[in-house]
Structures are given as C-alpha cells and as structure tokens.
Amino acid sequence: MRHLRANGYSPATVDTYAFDLRHLHDQVGEAPPASLTSPMIRRALASLRAQGIHPKTLARTLSVWRSFFNYLARQDQISANPCLGLRPPKGEKHLPNTLSVDQLAKLLLPLAVDAEEPVWMCRDLAMFELMYSSGLRRAELIALDLGQVDPGEGEVRVTGKGSKTRIVPVGKRALVALQAWLAVREEVAKNTPALFVGVRGARISATMLTHALKALAVRQGVSAHVHPHALRHSFASHVLQSSGDLRAVQEMLGHASLSTTQVYTHLDFQYLTKVYDQAHPRARKK
C-alpha cells in the first residue's frame, strides 16, 4: 500500500487493492506467497465466484492479485507470478447507462430560485452541468480547485486516473452555471481551494454529490435511473453520435486505451438501429 501511495495512486484505488488482497488472504490463509501456484489461485477465484461475486468484480480482483505478485517478483520475493495465464469467468456485458438528450435537458433545466436553498441549487446545477459538459468522473469533479476552470478559454484542467492531466472543453451552459455558483460560493466556503463545497464549507464528498444528483432528478421529475457516472456516459454517447470521432472522445474522457472508449460505438449503433426502424420504409415494424 505504501508503494501504491508513493506512485500516485488515488486513495480509492489503494482501498480497492487492500480490499481485494484481503480476499486473497481469506482464500489462502498464511501460506507464503512463494508457495502459491496457479491452481491455488484458480481455486480461490472459483470460491469467490461460488459466493456470488460478480464476474466483473472478479476480473478486477484477479488484476489486483496479478499486480501484487508482479510487485513481489520485482522485490525478488517470488520467482514466478501464479496469476499469469489465468482468466476470470466471463459475465454478461452491459452497456453503460445513458440518458437521452431530452432527459438531460429536463434534468439540467434551471429551477426558480428556492428561497431556502438558492446557494445549493446554484452549486448543484454548476456541478452537473460541468460533469455532463466535459465528461468528468465524479472523483475528478470533486478534486477540482478554483482556477482549474478557465472561463475565458472555455476549458477545464482535470487530473484523472494515474495523476494524468488533460484539458477538456466546457460548454456555454456550464460556464454560465459556474459563474452563478462562483458568485455565491464565498457565502458557504470555509478556507478551502475546492471549487465545490458541502454544507460544512469543506470540499464536497462523493456521497453528498450522489445524493444531490438524486434529489435533483426527483425535483426535476426525471424518472430514469440517474447516477454521477451516467452523466459521463451520456456525454460520450451524445458527442460520438454527433461527431463520429472516437479518438476525440477518447482524449476528452482520458481513456488510456481506445478499446475502453469503443463501448460507446455499441450505443451509437443502437441509436442508428432505432432511427432506421422508425424511418426506413422497409424496416420491420413491431
């Protein structure tokens, strides 16, 4: 864990590694790492699968174990990585949850100022306009400080996974919402550089942000399942539908590999299929 922190891994990632390594310890007990073999690791994975752990989670768990043994190999504590060549069980592939353009417009429609909570309404609209406008992860939004958004240039400087920095465009509506929030931010912020703060005046927490989005969806009458990452998925899907530029979407999302971004091409194909079925004279009718 100290090695991960020293190499810039986020606290959430370090916690995930610790969680998955506890699973390994639970499965193999006090057996020395050098004594572990591929069949033993395979049985450990099978045991976790029997406990009902989702295949996607198992894939992450195996990846963590593989990284752990690679670390031990570099430290000359083991001679071979027992996870090499192992694959997690395959599960069903689910496309990311996205909202339609109309649903996003309804969700982010400015409300009449509430006399009791005008500051927090300004904050919420600014947060979620920015998330959708620039395709930010929840953790990226929370980590933003004053000065990372440049209204003049219409861009935001984001620090993503692996401490990698990228610059992403910010839309006009998001900039307007941010200006409204910055005009009232000092009323509630307490000695913090954080762009977005919670009720105690410190940097907003992930839990508070999620609750705020759910409350906004209820208030705006959006019945679809809304969660922070859905705004990022919707951004990617909508930009790809309009531009067809997968590489640009990859850069804006901060994906290290184009294959990660390609899931949105499936969403785009679904959209094209829907349009075809509705518009083509010889399309199959239900």
Image (cartoon, rainbow, N blue to C red):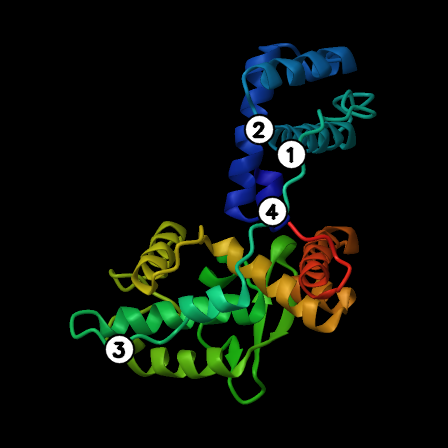
Q: Position of residue 70 (x, y in %)?
A: 75, 31
* Quarter of the figure with residue 4: top right
On the question of residue 67 being in view, the answer is yes
- The label nearer to you, 3 versus 1, is 3
If you read the primary sequence from the N terminus, does the residue marked by circle 2 or circle 3 appear first? Answer: 2
Residue found at x 21% / y 69%: 117
Q: Is residue 102 left or right of residue 41?
A: left
Query: Are dots 2 and 1 in contact, CB under 8 Å?
Result: yes
If you read the primary sequence from the N terminus, does the residue marked by circle 2 or circle 1 appear first? Answer: 2
Q: Is residue 23 left or right of residue 83?
A: left
Residue found at x 58% / y 26%: 21
Distance Cα–Cα, label 2 vs label 3: 46 Å
Label 4: how many Cα within 10 Å (few below 14, some 14–19, many 20+): few
**Residue that mark 1 sits on:** 60
What is the secondary structure assignment of the residue under circle 4? helix
If you read the primary sequence from the N terminus, does the residue marked by circle 4 or circle 2 appear first? Answer: 4
Distance Cα–Cα, label 4 vs label 3: 47 Å
Residue 112 numbered mark, or none? 3
